[in-house]
Image (tube, rainbow, N blue to C red):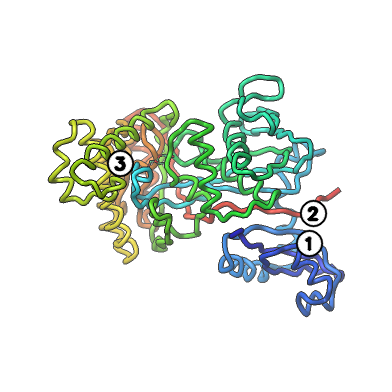
Amino acid sequence: MKPVYCYIVHCANQAFYTGWAKDLQRRIKQHNAGKGARYTKLNGPVSLVYWETQPNKISALRREREIKKYSHLQKKSLVSEWYPQMSAQNPTTQYEYLSIAPGRVNLLGEHIDYNGGSVLPAAIDRNVHLYANPRSDGIVSLTASDLEETISFRLDNLEKKMDLNGNPLPEWALFPAGVAWVAQERGYVVSGLEGEFTSNIPMGSGLSSSAAVEVAFAALWRELNDWPMDNLELSILCQQAENQYVGVNCGLMDQFSVANGIEHAALLFDTQSHEWQPVYIPKNIAIIIADSKKRRSLATSAYNERREACEQALTLLKQDLPEINTLNDVSLSEFETYGHKLPPIIYKRAKHVVEECHRVKQAADCLNKGDVKKFGEFMLDGHASLRDLYEVSIPELDTLVELASQIDGCYGARLSGAGFGGCTVSLVDQSKANQFIKQLDTGYQKSTGIKADIYLCQASQGVIVKWHEHAD
Ligand code: GLA
């Protein structure tokens, strides 16, 4: 199932009319045939000036209602608002498409998305903005504005991972190239692009900056080439790009949350069945991210090694528990009985996974019931387990968690993402959020000499693609 559209048409009387549709072109034809809506019948013909994707009918209807409340001026500015900030620097370039993909923070369920567990991430209000026009010569020419680097590569030569001049692609270009490569392997058409992107998701900080780039490109190509897939399938395609092209053996959590985020909610995502549901975050709770400023690189870190340890644990546990398919299938009591047979390191890794899978289920129930206090305790337990059993924390992250947990108004804190550096996430009473940020900032600087980046963030909507008429 493809996403649906929320759109604006410009009417002959200069007014804007807002609607939603599954098949956009068909809908516009209906309007112009006088069969769309009374208003457009009376004030047609209309021309499509703006659309954006929405994951489903409910969110499209909600968005339609929201836009309908806008004044004429507000609608006008929505239609033109996303003209690239970059076009100020490069006025000759105008882009018809904008794909916006958020980063994500994980509230609980770490290193279990490749073990069949349920995770609880949320998309956040930090985004990749990708501006682009299609081109017909099979070349992708991209500028990473933040890095001030431009790269062009051919779509018929992706295996080589080379640019047009035969130089190896830089790491950031592997993400779009990987998405294009997987799509082609699956038989989808991938069009050439001319584009630029910018991101305010800090790189290598555990907030899924790379998944956001992948999903931004995939969603754009889906629109341009009519790929028949929903956001879940889109995220699987991006995960395959990361696994098979970039070379990081990640699970599905990051790409899934970037594609499917919901405002004000975390997503309880079962990585085995792929079923999921939103878990709304109470209004009086602030999500605060603290970036330790210690960077990591997922590909060169021990991430793949941890994953192998889990595979070994599964193979060994299967000798006593032949019916299990993933570590998520092992109950706490089964692990108690058979876990001690595992070699010491493998035992520690598997213990974290089995307990974390269990923890997410209990904690999600608490959050659903609004029991943030109990949820916060689970977060702290989760961090201790990542530190002592899975051994993916670093002293700076431990310091941030330790300090945060002692500040008034904090319910819980933990490292978020793969670890080995990056960020912590804390849930804090909204009324104490500013004070919390100040205290954590001072405390961290005093303990480590490092100035952290600490900010409030909102659980946000997943990827959307916007389009508007080319202004020649
Ligand atoms: C990275 C990976 C995810 C997940 C987390 C750890 O973010 O991309 O798939 O495994 O680490 O929970």
Asked whether the viewer can see residue 399, the reply is no
- Read off the residue under disc 1: 48
Left/right placement of residue 451 relative to residue 359 reads: right
Residue visible at 78% across and 35% down? 137
Assign a secondary structure to mark 2: loop
Q: Is mark 1 within 8 Å of ligand 1?
A: no
Residue visible at 23% across and 49% down? 330
Assess whether mark 1 and mark 3 are in contact (beta carbons under 8 angstroms): no
Residue closer to the observer: 174 or 127: 174
Residue visible at 18% across and 31% down? 344
Crowding at label 1, few (<14), some or many (≥20) Cα neighbours within 10 Å?
A: some
Residue closer to the observer: 183 or 357: 183
The answer to which image quadrant residue 346 occupies is top left
Assess whether mark 2 and mark 1 are in contact (beta carbons under 8 angstroms): yes
Left/right placement of residue 249 relative to residue 327 reads: right
- Read off the residue under disc 2: 469
Left/right placement of residue 250 relative to residue 354 reads: right
Tally of numbered tags: 3
Residue closer to the observer: 254 or 147: 254
Disc 3 to disc 2, C-alpha distance: 48 Å
- Read off the residue under disc 3: 401
Q: Of marks 3 and 1, which one's residue comes earlier in the chain?
A: 1
Left/right placement of residue 68 relative to residue 9 reads: left
Disc 3 to disc 1, C-alpha distance: 50 Å
Assign a secondary structure to mark 3: helix
Q: Nearer the viewer, mark 3 or mark 2?
A: 2
Amino acid tagged 1: Leu
Amino acid tagged 2: Glu
Q: Of marks 1 and 2, which one's residue comes earlier in the chain?
A: 1
Residue 112: percent from the left, percent from the top? 34, 45
